[in-house]
Image (cartoon, rainbow, N blue to C red):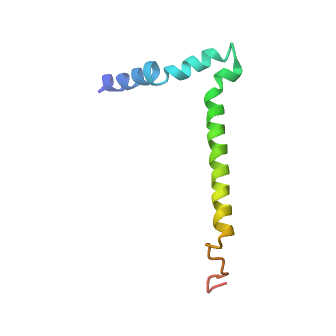
Amino acid sequence: MKDLFYAIQDFFVNVAFAPLDMLRALELENWFAANSLNWLFVIIAGVAMVYWMLQLKKFDSNNEEDKSISSHSYL
């Protein structure tokens, strides 16, 4: 059973996180290149937010959303 946990540890330390170790070593040479993965995620999130806002604007301008005011009976 102990060997199973050591095998899992070995896989993650030596295989799965090897690209991240390369990025950590690259940081000493070029900070922007080392953070390229983060920049990619920021760009994807920005594009997704712009797309989401454009879709909300489209539905708002078509008056497809029910904007009737209703509250709970206890209010």
- The correct choice, above or below, for 28 with respect to 53 in the image is above
Left or right, residue 66 beside residue 14: right
Which residue occupies 35% across, 22% down?
7
Spot occupied by residue 52 in the image (x, y as percentages of width and height): 63, 54
Q: Residue furthest bottom?
A: 73
Task: Decide if residue 26 is on the left or right side of residue 3.
Answer: right
Which of these two is toward me, 75 or 1?
75
* Quadrant holding the C terminus: bottom right
Frontmost residue, 72 versus 69: 69
| Image height of 51 relative to 69, above or below | above
Above or below: residue 53 compared with residue 60: above
Q: Residue furthest left?
A: 1
Answer with the quarter of the image where residue 27 lies: top right
Give residue 29's quadrant in the image: top right
Estimate the x, y position of residue 57 in percent, counting from the top left: 68, 62
**Towards the viewer: 58 or 16:** 58
Residue at position x 64%, y 82% from top?
A: 70
Could you tell me which residue is drawn at 29 percent across and 27 percent down? 1
Q: Position of residue 26 (x, y in %)?
A: 63, 16
Decide which of 7, 23 is in the foreground and name it.
Answer: 23
Quadrant in the picture for residue 42 = top right
